[in-house]
Every structure is written in structure tokens, then in C-alpha cells.
Image (cartoon, rainbow, N blue to C red):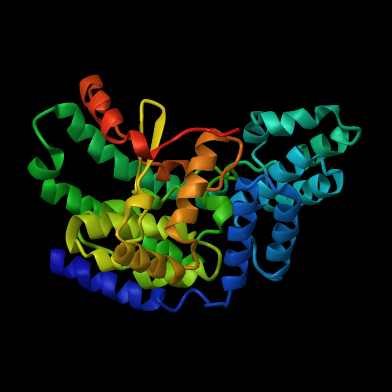
Amino acid sequence: MKKMLKIILIIILFKGSLIAQKSDVPDYYNLINQAELSICDSDLAKALVLYDSAFQSIENKIPYYKDVYNALISAIEKNDDTSILKYWDALCKQGLDSAFINGSQKVNALRDKTYWRKLENDMNLYHKEKDARYLFLCEVINDDQKIRKEYDARRIGNKYVVFRDTIMFVDSLNYIRLITDCNTNGFPDDNIAINFNPFNHPVYYYVLEHNAMWNRIWMDAAILKNIDSLRFHPLLYTKLMDYHNDQFVKDAERMYGTNYHAIIDGRLFVFSGQLEPGLKEQINLNRSRVHLEDIDSYSKKIAFQFFHRDYCLIYPFLFSRMVVDQSVAEILFKKWKDVEVKSNR
């Protein structure tokens, strides 16, 4: 059975490797990185210019939803009415979840604007119910979670040891469903996969991670191509590859540095400044190959977003949170006191 599953996956993946059309988009990622660093530096005017340039650089592609959202929040903070209307329109064209929008304090601050009625009408006009593709992906992830919850409820040891073969098999089936869907329909557009909420990660992400748990990263080539199609964010790829590397490869030369920070009891600690120069250089090289910022810039964005929750420079699930006993926390607080990040504004 395992051999048959592997053969099926190889056939599917051979087809899937041809799906995505590679495109040259390093300018987009570079401009977005500069815009996000400008936000961190409180230079919102510069950030808006860079966002404009980034969106103009990909004429026939849909920008990442979170990038348009961050541009809108920057425009709101700068009180730039022209940019507010422009980025609101851009979000509307991708689709809106009115529940998310109504829950945003920054957006609700626009109610005092003379053009609020227009924004509200646009929101109602472009409100999207859950897309059929999204609902299918929800079914896949629900099946992924269902078996894990059932075994957790039995409380008879580590489910990944006791029920290893069964979980591996179910994960294989879910992987095939995801791959087959991507072959048939292409990778889901970013806005659909996150259900029109920039703070969400793609609903199918944990299907990828749970198969990486079994040393299956057979979608790697297709994912890389869809990074160039703006359908799979490189931040997600580095998270997945660091997880796989930690579990199996354990090769420092393949690290992307997604976990050089920790949050404990609402306090942030960043360790990238303590990296050996050679390791930092290798991590930065790896990150540059998938159009990402260097590790120090990534840490800067982590710190900024930790204190400015209205922005989504980093997907929230990428934050490394630790749950430890209070006695252990106190020891770590003392040990890491020199790398704790505190708000300076």
C-alpha cells in the first residue's frame, strides 16, 4: 500500500511540477521588504511610495493580500485620503470579509471620514462568502485534524508513536487530495487560501507540515514555482523547510532562521544578533534565494509587529511562543535579559 501511494504521488507530482508558470518577481519582493522596513522606521510616506512601485511591478498578478492590507493601514496612519481610497479599492477587488473589516480598529476609525459611506457600500458590494475552493481545503484540513483529535481524546500515550501508521496513511491521503486539487485548479490564490483575512495562514498549510513530519516534501518544486507566481509566500516556505530540517536533515547550511526568537508570557526575546557570522551569512544567502529579507531585518519586523498588532508584516502563526512553568520562565528571563526587546514608542 505504501509503495502504491508513493507511485501515485510521483505521477501526480510529475504533472504538478508543470503547473506554475515561473515569473521574474524579485523586484516585487524587494520593494515590499523595503516598504515594510520603512513602516518599522515610521517613514510611512516612503512606505506608500514603495508599495505603489511594488504593485505596479506585477501588472498581471495579484499581490499578496497582506501587502495590500499593510499599505491600507499605512495610508490610514498617515491620514492620506488618496491612498486610503486606492488601497481600499484594491482590497475590494480581491474580496472582503466584512466581519474581519468591521473588527479592525484602524478601519473603523475611518467612520468619521466624509467618504465613509462609499467605503461601506464597497464593503457590502464586494463582501465574499467562503469560496468553494476554500471550503474544499477546509474539508481536507478538517480530516487532518479529526484523526489527531480522536487519538488525543483517548489519552493513551503519544499519538504519533501509538497510532503512527494510521496517521501516516491518513496524512498521505490528504496530501494526495491537496496535490490533485492543485494539479486540477492550480495553486489557490492567496486571498482565497486565507479567506480574505491577512492575519490567516493558508488553510491547507498544516497538511504540508504534517507530511513534512513524515519526511515528505514532495511539493517542494511546485511550491518554489508558486512563490514566483505570488500564490505561496516565501515566509511559509521557510517555516516549512526549517521544520523539516529540524526533524530530519539537521543541516545548518539549509536553515532559514525562522525560530531565532521566543515569546514567553508576553515578553519577546530575539537571538539573531548572537548568531556566528558564518551561520548568519549562510542563513541570509538561503533567504535571499527565495526573495526574503536578511535575518536581522526579519527580526526587526518580528519586533515591530509584536508591539503594533494592526500590521501584518509577519503571519502571526510564525511567532515562536513558548509555554513553560513560571519557575522555568524566571530562569529564562534572567538568562535572556540582554536579548529582550522592549517597545521604544
Residue 258, percent across and down?
37, 52
Count of number-bearing discs: 0
Query: From the viewer's perspective, is 301 left or right of 87?
Result: left
- For residue 142, which quarter of the picture? top left
Q: Residue at x 34, y 73 (%)?
A: 13
The relative height of residue 299 versus residue 232 in the rendered view (above or below) is above
Q: Outermost residue, right direction?
A: 114
Query: From the viewer's perspective, is 317 left or right of 167?
Result: right
The relative height of residue 80 versus residue 3 in the rendered view (above or below) is above
Query: From the viewer's perspective, is 107 left or right of 326?
Result: right
Q: Outermost residue, front direction?
A: 338
Q: Is residue 244 visible?
A: yes
Q: Outermost residue, top direction?
A: 326
Q: Is residue 183 visible?
A: no
Q: Which quadrant is the C terminus positioned in?
A: top right
* Closest to the observer, 291 or 225: 291
Residue 273, percent across and down?
38, 51
* Closest to the observer, 283 or 86: 283
Q: Residue at x 32, y 60 (%)?
A: 241
Q: Residue at x 46, y 73 (%)?
A: 225
Residue 230, percent across and down?
56, 64
* Closest to the observer, 13 or 320: 320
Q: Which quadrant is the N terminus positioned in?
A: bottom left
- For residue 11, which quarter of the picture? bottom left
Query: From the viewer's perspective, is 18 left or right of 98?
Result: left
Residue 343, percent across and down?
53, 33
